[in-house]
Image (cartoon, grey):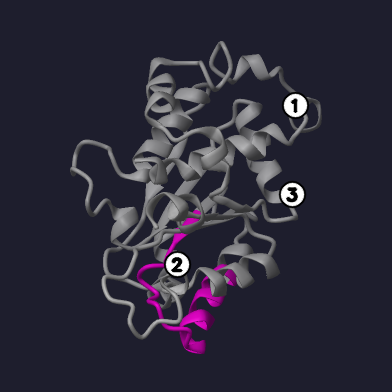
Amino acid sequence: MAVGWSGTRELAALRQTVSLRQVASSASPSACVAPGGWRTSNKYAREVADRSLPERQLRKGIVSDGGDTSRSRRFLAKLLRGEAVTVVAIGGSITWGQGSTKGSNLDWSSRLFAWLRASFPAANHTLLNRAVPATPSSYMSLCVSWHVPPDADLVIAEYNINDGPGKADEIRQAHERLLRKLLVYPNRPAVIELLYYRRPNNFTNEVSPYRHHGDDEMGVLAEYYHLPLLSCRALMWDLTS
């Protein structure tokens, strides 16, 4: 599924915007990136590209690069120098793997982790799926220190579905508390918002099915905190409506 690869494409898009001389001056990129470049470095990557949506369609899912890319640049610099990174996925049942075949590594985080290992094989990366099914941001905002280690370099948060379609302030405040806690982690990790979208079965009372979930509200928080934002609504809407 292409939506499972939006996180991967974001990493690729960010990497294209950074000069190798600026972020990896201490090591040759060829020493830490698989031969042939990340796009063609291995059979796994080529098979994924064959199943994916066209590049133009995928770019629609990158709603924002975050404005301030210093955290993302630091994360990518470590990869390009061949250093080990710690990547953590948090969220609800989608991130946990609901709907995918368990044990087959078809959920989005497993695919992203496999891509990272194959594309940057010079180090032993720590890749953690710390999602808890049926939990909203309010749970993770209280228990984030139990799930996300202090040395995290990148955290991808997926809570658009579990936080619900309502626009209530307390829902968004809980998500903002989670973001603020992540952003003051000791390692100053890059934080990416990943917004899944589920089209409502009955939206008679909705202003528009396009606004059924909290994409717009989370987008405001991402803009304020300068976070990259990946939206499956933006990615897939014109293909499903």
> From the viewer's perspective, is residue 169 above or below residue 101?
below
**Residue at screen point 63% across, 38% down:** 13
Residue underneath mark 2: 144
**Residue at screen point 30% across, 63% down:** 132
The answer to which of marks 1 and 2 sits earlier in the sequence is 1
In the rendered structure, the answer to whether residue 209 lies left or right of residue 64 reads left
Q: Is residue 152 visible?
A: no
Between disc 1 and disc 2, the foreground one is 1
Secondary structure state at the residue bearing disc 2: helix
User: Which amino acid, mark 2?
Assistant: Val
Mark 1 crowd level (few <14, some 14–19, many ≥20, 10 Å Cα) = some
The residue lying toward the viewer, choosing from 176 and 130, is: 176
User: Which amino acid, mark 1?
Assistant: Leu
Which mark is drawn over residue 20?
1
Residue 55: % across, % down: 54, 34
> From the viewer's perspective, is residue 142 above or below residue 74?
below
In the rendered structure, the answer to whether residue 63 lies left or right of residue 105 reads right
Mark 3 crowd level (few <14, some 14–19, many ≥20, 10 Å Cα) = few
The image quadrant of residue 205 is: bottom left
**173 part of magenta stretch:** yes
The residue range painted magenta reads: 156-180
